[in-house]
Image (cartoon, coloured by chain):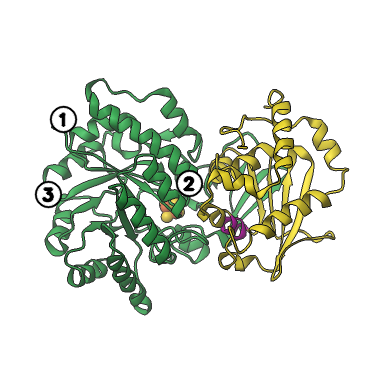
Amino acid sequence: MKLPTQLPNFTLPEFFARFGQRLPQLPPTLALITALNLALGRLLPREPLEPLLGKRLAIRVSDAGLTLRFAYGERGFRPSFGSVAADLTITARTRDFLALLAREEDADTLFFNRRLQMQGETELGLLVKNTLDAIELPHVTLNSLAPAQALQHLRRILSGARNSGA
Amino acid sequence: MSSLAPLELVCPAGTLPALKAAVDHGADCVYLGFRDETNARNFNGLNFDDAALAEGLRYAHARGRKVFLALNTFPQADNWQRWTGAVDRAAKAGVDALILADLGLLDYARRNHPRLRLHLSVQGSATSYEAINFYRERFAIQRAVLPRVLSLAQVAEVIAHTDVEIEVFGFGGLCVMVEGRCSLSAFTTGTSPNCNGACSPAKSVRWEQTAQGMETRLNGVLIDRYADSERAGYPTLCKGRFTVDEATYYAIEEPTSLNTLELLPQMVEIGIRAIKIEGRQRSPIYVAQVTKVWRAAIDACRRDPAHFSPQPNWMAELNKVSEGQSHTLGAYYRPWK
Ligand code: SF4
């Protein structure tokens, strides 16, 4: 199974943002850090990520009302709790995060177009971006990172949201 | 038509996937740098170590393409060996050319690796054929990358008076015309593109969403504020908005990108040998998108230069990935002479 080769430009309906905020954020955070920890030391090299040690990161998926907070330490990624502000917060829509993951968009392009925001320690953001860019990631291995069902689910959301986008 | 000199497309690579994207989409040459201040895109996580360079060279050479290594910053007295070491590593790895700016390094490379092809970097700021011919005579440079300050007529004048191949920038972010000499970043952050390889280093950059818009600060200094509807640019001082005599505007330079696609036939006609695409800091997808468009354009121009005109979808694709609100022909189309 493959992600669509060109992601349509969509925004999730308002509904997601309103309800997403009220849902527990832990399960999606766990899903993300599980994937990251699986990749760590294999796809994702540890050495360039050293400056991230002890840092709190937040990924805000604006149109889904999701904020995934996690930290990176010696033992890998873990969820981060509490109200301490993240050292780096990256904000974008679902569609744009997916496009970045699938390497269909350049982060600077999204930034120029105001579709990607970075607040906090910019250097960490650049490091993450460059480290991800340096990974040799053929399209197929992207799929192997996530369970097949999740992708199936994603595709359903994608096709449902396709016509509601900006 | 086939009498036209071949025009090389020289594309950027900050990572191995970007190099492969450039090669796969039609770059004739790829330029890159090592992971330190010996090159002008010294950013965390970017650039090539020896293993990545070896793999990049293998990939490009297997497909008949070339790899140039940029050592385009200026060493200081206490770190000279880092730069000469980089020259030696590049020579040993088997790069097709070194892109150098510093006179001392040109001399070092010439003496120690006489068979290695040398290109004069844009950072060398040579704008006259007299200067370029001097570099040729002293260091046997085979190509010079011209600073983005000359009009096409001036470029033609240079080409007419030198045997050195001339490479020019065709697309990408612009620096305000003082290549190799700008000290705006050093003034605000203590880090200069010319010695440390980074203009506006990320550690000094902060973006903050405020009630008035998104603010960009460089080492605490407010350099721009964007309304929600405005496109953003890189956080460089030259492209900031400042208040001068009560008016707030781009006091130094507007954040636009260079795009010379429509000048291709003239560029070929005056004998430019290579067109360079800016952007080693960008992702593999940018390299793929831009390389693809330029490859198509150069091929179309080669087939039929008289009827060449940039296709709207090429321009749209390039505008999409550009910094700032618009693109410009830069100095190439200025009336000055
Ligand atoms: S401040 Fe502007 S002109 Fe100066 S080096 Fe940086 S990008 Fe170039």
Q: Which mark is residue B60?
A: none
The color chain A is rendered in: yellow
* Residue B5 falls inside the magenta stretch: no
Q: Earlier in the sequence, mark 2 or mark 1?
A: 1
Q: Which chain is green?
A: B
Q: Give the residue at mark 2.
A: B284
Element assignment for label 1: loop
- Tell me how far mark 3 sits from mark 2, CA to CA: 34 Å
Q: Which residues are magenta?
A: A122-128
* Residue A124 falls inside the magenta stretch: yes
Q: Does residue B114 show up?
A: yes
**Picture coordinates of residue B49, whole percent (x, y):** 43, 65
Element assignment for label 2: helix
Is the residue indicated by label 1 positioned so its CB lies within 8 Å of ligand 1? no
Q: Earlier in the sequence, mark 3 or mark 1?
A: 1
Q: Give the residue at mark 1.
A: B2
**Picture coordinates of residue A130, whole percent (x, y):** 53, 55
Q: Taking B56 as reference, is A7 above or below it? A: above
Q: The residue marked by circle 1 belongs to what chain?
A: B
Callout 1: few (<14), some (14-19), or many (20+) C-alpha neighbours within 10 Å?
few
Q: Give the residue at mark 3.
A: B163
Residue B132: name its quadrant.
bottom left
